[in-house]
Image (cartoon, rainbow, N blue to C red):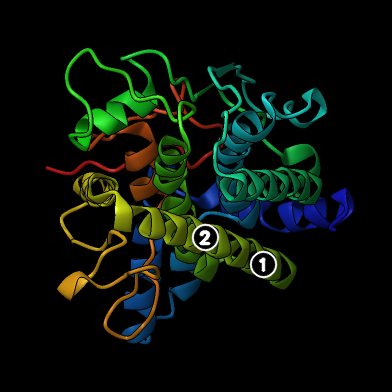
Amino acid sequence: MLDTSTVEQIMIKRAEKRARRREFFRNSGGLGVGLIAGVALSACGSDNEAVAQSNAPTDPEILNFALNLEYLEAQFYQFAAFGNGLPADLLAGAGTQGAVRGGRAVAFKDPVVAQYAREIAGDELQHVRFLRAALGTSAVAQPAIDIDGASPASAFSNAARAAGLIGPGQAFDPYSSDENFLLGAYIFEDVGVTAYKGASPLIQNKTFLEAAAGILAAEAYHAGLVRTVLYGKGLATPALRTATVAISDARDSLDGSSDVDQGIVGTADVSNIVPLDDNGIAFSRTPGDVLNIVYLTKESVTQGGFFPNGVNGALNLSSAYA
């Protein structure tokens, strides 16, 4: 686990770089823009490669973006598995600390699903602890989070409505059944995997990169577990399988024109537990794309959905898509 002095040294070295960075890049979720610029200049043999690299977010900014997502996942699983949220000593930090709206224990009927929920809850708690320790005094506070399951206006209800799972005025409650809990988890897990995959190429410090790779692996295990259980239950409940496809399509509709998201059923009605491209490689999302999904919007905004007041940190703007 990294100590505060290590992170502070890295941040001091990058202070001049951050000062030169244009305001557009500091406030945008366009992590991919900096990456594309760097690749283009490198391909042309430009001497301005350092300038392109300076447009990319710093390691602490990337890890803080990840920390916001971990807060969301950890709170959801903590409430679902144990009926309470994260401890108070893991919530304070830079930026505005927010409260959690909603969340309660699931009365699991399947003991296997209950155990999975407890296991993932423990993992996500440790992710929050680790990232906060690694970032030290630069760690952002938990922002306001909406994981309510009772209101038709909640983030879960709006996400389910966008996927066509519920109608106007109805609420989607991820705490009401094993199946609804799995669908709620399914919304988050695939997004977390693609977020870490997209950010990892831009992390400069090898210690941070190794840590991010480790969390990416854990999130991938979680996503695979959730997708596997959903597929198994969906064999007996076709409506559940249909719901997973609808959620996948809804995510895809928010994060750009490319069709990259995949449900748990592939062609010829076979399983699709691991969503990959033609080369067998998992796909990536930029922070802007990730925020489109968790903000539940195709617009360029700084708040909404599961983060009603936005995330804390420099990477807080979703991408605009027609």
Disc 2, SS: helix
Residue 238 lies left or right of residue 89; in this view the side is left
Residue with the mark numbered 2: 225
Disc 1, SS: helix
Amino acid carrying label 1: it is: Gly
The C terminus lies in quadrant: top left
Query: In terms of depth relative to the viewer, which is nearer, 315 or 218?
Result: 218
Residue drawn 29% across the image and 77% down it: 277
Residue drawn 40% across the image and 70% down it: 274
Residue 318 lies left or right of residue 107; in this view the side is left
Q: Residues within 10 Å of mark 1 (few under 14, many from 20)?
A: few
Q: Residues within 10 Å of mark 2 (few under 14, many from 20)?
A: some
- Quarter of the image for residue 40 reads bottom left
Where 178 sits versus 44, above or below?
above
Residue with the mark numbered 1: 214
- The image shows residue 90 at horizontal and vertical percentages of 77, 32
* Residue 52 appears anywhere in the view: yes
Q: Nearer the viewer, mark 2 or mark 1?
A: 2
Residue 185 lies left or right of residue 305; in this view the side is right
Amino acid carrying label 2: it is: Leu
